[in-house]
Image: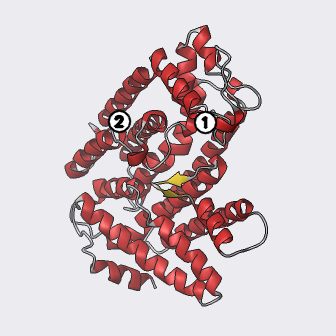
Amino acid sequence: MANDTLEGNRHRGVPRQGASPHTLIDAIQGTLADFLAAQIGSLDSIDPALGRFARTARDLVHAGGKRLRPVFAYWGWRGSAGPDAPVEPVLPAFAALELMHTFALIHDDVMDESDTRRGRPTAHRIFAGQHENDGSIGDPQRFGSSAAILIGDLCLVWADQLLARSEAPPTVRACYDRMRVEAIAGQYLDILGENQPGAWSVDRALLVARHKTASYTVQRPLQLGLALTGAAQSETEQAYGSYGLAVGEAFQLRDDLLGVYGDPAITGKPAGDDLRTGKPTALLMLARKLATPAQRAELTLDPAGAVNPADGSGGPTDARTEGGFTQAQIERRAGIIAETGAPARLEAMIQERVADGVAALAQAPIHEEARAALIELAVRVTHRPA
């Protein structure tokens, strides 16, 4: 099966040397498509319902996305492997990162009760809709959440299977496992913060960003790519670690800003979701730190999750959103955050981290093509509109 997967991708223009972003992503997409087709066939042969289940997972994997994790892993590998090393043997490892990412997104959406992702219904909403359309008994929302958790679990198992198809030394698995533990640890801290907002701070929000986002988005994919070469290069690994941590944090800080001020038509998610849930992002923590007492009072949630405006206005209950906020309240909170100067301060923090990341690569013993690509990526992923 592994040979079939790689052979199928050769017809998709797998890059043997330095790849353009589109060519590389096409190769990763091809690897995923071939792998998922076989998995769907296997489950479909057991029961048609499982085939439908697996096809939903496939559609979620292919539902857009920037494929950043495989791209960072590729350039981490190319930086050490050089421009002439064939990429086919390591493509499964790169594609596995996208399956892990899908697992993380699906579970995150269940925990946040998000309605959309990448402009489409989230996994639990898809399954709830299937439940209703099929005329099934029971609670469609409960069914949707249960099925989505299983889809996420399946994607994580698939990631393991696909990683095993690459020609990988043992150090790759160690890096991969560390990345998974860090992502789960960061996610737990994230939900803990939502339930203990009074105990949170800017520093703790940044700690969440390092583990939930920076680790598995930039830092560990780069180091995994390096590990795929089989070379012991501590200086390069250290440079990738510093770059990955800085750029990964900047990536999350941009995400915090987009979560409040992004255009839903571009981001694919409703604006204000973080404000609706009271998620203690670095943006919100910084705003509270910079706020006047009156502003801080408006940014504070009561124990039931409802905002306490200084003027006492709450709006009629039937005008509230599912999370307990009216749209006007969400917009008001976004305005207050802007008034504190927190968004401008966060922009400065992003710039500082990008500069730190680029500086970390300056003396790294990597091929110049990879250095240039990683510098360009640092700017592109931290100044994105979605």
- Residue count near mark 2 (Cα–Cα under 10 Å), binned few <14, some 14–19, many ≥20: many
- Which residue: 65% across, 87% down? 47
- Which residue: 23% across, 70% down? 16
- Residue count near mark 1 (Cα–Cα under 10 Å), binned few <14, some 14–19, many ≥20: many
Q: Secondary structure at mark 1?
A: helix
Task: Locate residue 317, reporting x and y percent.
Answer: 71, 34
The residue carrying mark 2 is 357
Q: CA distance from mark 1 to mark 2?
A: 32 Å
Q: Earlier in the sequence, mark 1 or mark 2?
A: 1
The residue carrying mark 1 is 276
Residue 152 left/right relative to 136: left
Q: Amino acid at mark 1?
A: Arg
In the rendered image, the vertical position of residue 206 relative to residue 6, given as above or below: above
Residue 221 versus residue 254: which sits nearer the camera? 254
In the rendered image, the vertical position of residue 263 relative to residue 154, given as above or below: above
- Which residue: 36% across, 74% down? 30
Q: Secondary structure at mark 2?
A: helix
Among the 4 quarters of the image, the one containing residue 187: top right
Q: Is residue 14 visible?
A: yes
Query: Quick one: quadrant of the C terminus?
Result: top left
In the rendered image, the vertical position of residue 1 relative to residue 311, given as above or below: below
Among the 4 quarters of the image, the one containing residue 80: bottom left
Residue 253 versus residue 333: which sits nearer the camera? 333
